[in-house]
Image: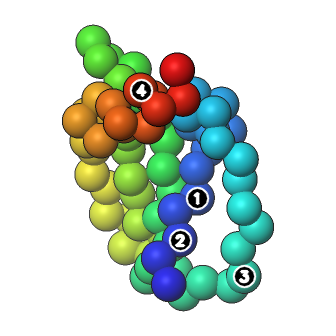
């Protein structure tokens, strides 16, 4: 199972409630944070490989924000 572990900053920004997870293999576990440059970006870092990637938040979360507002 894929596990996305949001930082408190991202949880607050996305207005979501965290869920407790059981043990997950670190290969499938990612830490996720938010970074404000000119626009908001989401940073994903794999727990095992420490491989990171960054995506523009508005591309993926526009539907989520429009439904909550």
- The image quarter containing residue 40 is top left
Q: Do the residues labelled 1 and 4 touch (CB within 8 Å)?
A: no
| Disc 1: CA contacts within 10 A as few (<14), some (14-19) or many (>=20) | many
Placement of 31 over or under 37, stated as above or below: below
Q: Mark 4 points at which residue?
A: 66
Q: Nearer the viewer, mark 2 or mark 4?
A: 4
x and y percent of residue 36 in the render? Answer: 39, 20
Disc 1 from disc 3: Cα separation: 12 Å
Tell me if residue 9 can be seen: no
Disc 2 from disc 1: Cα separation: 6 Å
Earlier along the polypeptide chain: callout 1 or callout 3?
Answer: 1
Earlier along the polypeptide chain: callout 3 or callout 2?
Answer: 2
Q: Name the residue under label 2.
A: 3
10 sits to left or right of 55: right
Q: Mark 1 points at which residue?
A: 5
Q: Name the residue under label 3.
A: 22
| Disc 4: CA contacts within 10 A as few (<14), some (14-19) or many (>=20) | few
Nearer the observer, 69 or 51: 69
Secondary element at tag 1: strand
Disc 2 from disc 4: Cα separation: 25 Å
Placement of 2 over or under 30, stated as above or below: below
Disc 1 from disc 4: Cα separation: 23 Å
């Amino acid at each position: 199972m894929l596990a996305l572990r949001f930082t408190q900053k991202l949880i607050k920004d996305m207005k979501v409630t965290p869920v407790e997870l059981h043990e997950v293999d670190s290969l499938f576990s990612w830490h996720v944070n938010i970074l404000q440059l000119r626009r908001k970006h989401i940073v994903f870092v794999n727990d095992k490989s420490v491989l990171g990637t960054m995506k523009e938040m508005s591309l993926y979360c526009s539907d989520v924000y429009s439904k909550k507002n």
